[in-house]
Image (tube, rainbow, N blue to C red):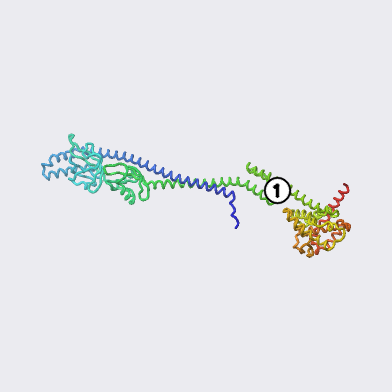
Amino acid sequence: MMPKRPPRLLVRTLAVTFVSVAVLLGGVFAVVIVSVRDQVRQSVADNLEAGQRIFGAIESRRERELRAQAATLAENPTLKATIDTYAAESRSSDEARRSLLLNTMANELDKVAARVDADALVLADTHQVTLASSGRLADRWPRGRPVSVDGPNRADAVDGVDGVLRAGGLLFRVVSVPLQLNDVSIATLYVASNLDQRYANELATLANARAAIVSDGLIVATTLPPAATREFEAAAENRLPIGTVTLDGQSYAFRRLVQVGTTGFYALSSIDEHSRTATSTAIQNLIGIAGVAVVLALVASFWLARMLTGPIGKLSASLAHAGSVRDARVMLPLTGSSRELDALTETFNALMASVATAEEQAQSAYTGSIRALAAALDARDPYTAGHSERVSVVSVAIARALGLGAEAIEVIRLGALLHDIGKIGVPDEVLLKPGGLTQAEFDIIKQHPVAGARILRSVPFLIPHIPIVELHHERPDGRGYPYGLRGDDIPMAARIVHVADAYDAITSKRAYRAARPASEALRELWRCAGTEFHAEVVGALATALPGLTSERSEAVAEQVHA
């Protein structure tokens, strides 16, 4: 299984930037939502407080107006005279007379009620017993029933009272005004407003919130939803003047606008409802901002990534090219994009220059070692002096004519210098024998390719040349040595050195014969092509031979002039 390749630097830069922006935006979203909720909570509390002030101001003004109206109405002389007469004669008069006085009193109260915006006007004697009532809910105040007000002051206070009372199963908020005659209180006039749904709606409008009227732990009227109403009522007994409460799964802020006895008037506002709208608006705005931010971040990160990865990519491509050509002398161009990359490039170039120098020195030592070995071999026989060098030159010319690559040619050049290195182990009496060899002596000579290969195997940098040394006497017809290989089983390098070796042997002087001309040597090679030599190699030699003879003539001329 191939190892997974890491992502490109451009992708990683974009990913890191995008994740960073996403995390930042996520944090901003969380902070904004929490901040919006806190601001909404505070805003709701402020609104309720403002609503309380407004409600208190409006209620105070309305009460003053009602009290002023009631005080004005209480000055009705006819009503006062009727009440005074009733008070004076009620004990001594018969039932008919008292009934007449009460009816007169009721008629006068009806006239007063027509000019007052109230659910009921109630007239009570000094004992707070109802004498007459008028208005839309007058039937809730039957004659003769005592009036009991739940409020901060008693009902018989001189300046009247703002209180709450229950009558006929309904709850009323009342304002009372004493009726006086000659500075003596003769009765009390109550202006009553029913604490019903209409009153709760008006309260909600004034407070700009939901409203609830709680009396003795029970909700009398409210604008809350039914489920929230039941939950608020369940906890009404322990309700504080201000705070928050969860109703029907929503968080509500509440404030008690006023408390009259056991009756409280509350304004409530849903924090979730307000924050939902505010949060939705904030999120919509943030989404727009986030979209723009993401686009800008991606564009900026892409530009930054390209700015970073472009030079690195060029440097990487240059490194890949240098690695592909395997030439330590290749210098990488400076990108000019940053000091760091240029410093890295210069360091790499300096390192490669050192490597190139070391390679050249190693190659020089390598080649010198091979030439020394070849020279040591040639020094044993004056007649073969320079044979290895000449075979190397001819082999390179043949390889070039065959179109082989530079690396293959270099292997052939140095392998040809070493092709007879195995003859170091051949005794002088055999190697230097001027006459023909016996079969036993020839068998010893035939062992030199194997001996040469054995020598080269002990030197790692000479291993590429072993096929040339070991197989340069193999023949296409299989009659070569040491293994009798045939045709294409013989490596091309060994075929080339075989032909070059034979060509130099024919054209060189020996102790037992004179040197033969190049043309005659070529005819001999063609004659044996296909059996002893590979025909395409002989053809390549024929192609390269004009240049070789010219080079050799120039070399001879230089030696003569010298």
Locate the N terminus and report the quarter of the image it occupies. Answer: bottom right
Residue 225: x %, y % from top left: 34, 50
Instruction: Answer few, some or many: residues within 10 Å of disc 1's Cα (few below 14, many 20 plus, some between 14 and 19).
Output: some
| 94 on left or right of 118 | left
Count of marks, rendered view: 1
Instruction: Name the quadrant containing residue 511.
Output: bottom right
**Amino acid beneath label 1:** Ala
Front residue of 325/443: it is 443
From this viewpoint, is residue 117 visible? no
Q: Secondary structure at mark 1?
A: loop
Question: Which residue does the image show at 75% across and 49% down from the upper left?
Answer: 365
Residue 359: x %, y % from top left: 72, 48
Front residue of 335/61: it is 335
| 134 on left or right of 293 | left
Front residue of 549/156: it is 549
Mark 1 sits on what residue?
328
Residue 210: x %, y % from top left: 34, 46
**264 is higher (above) or lower (below) than 501:** above
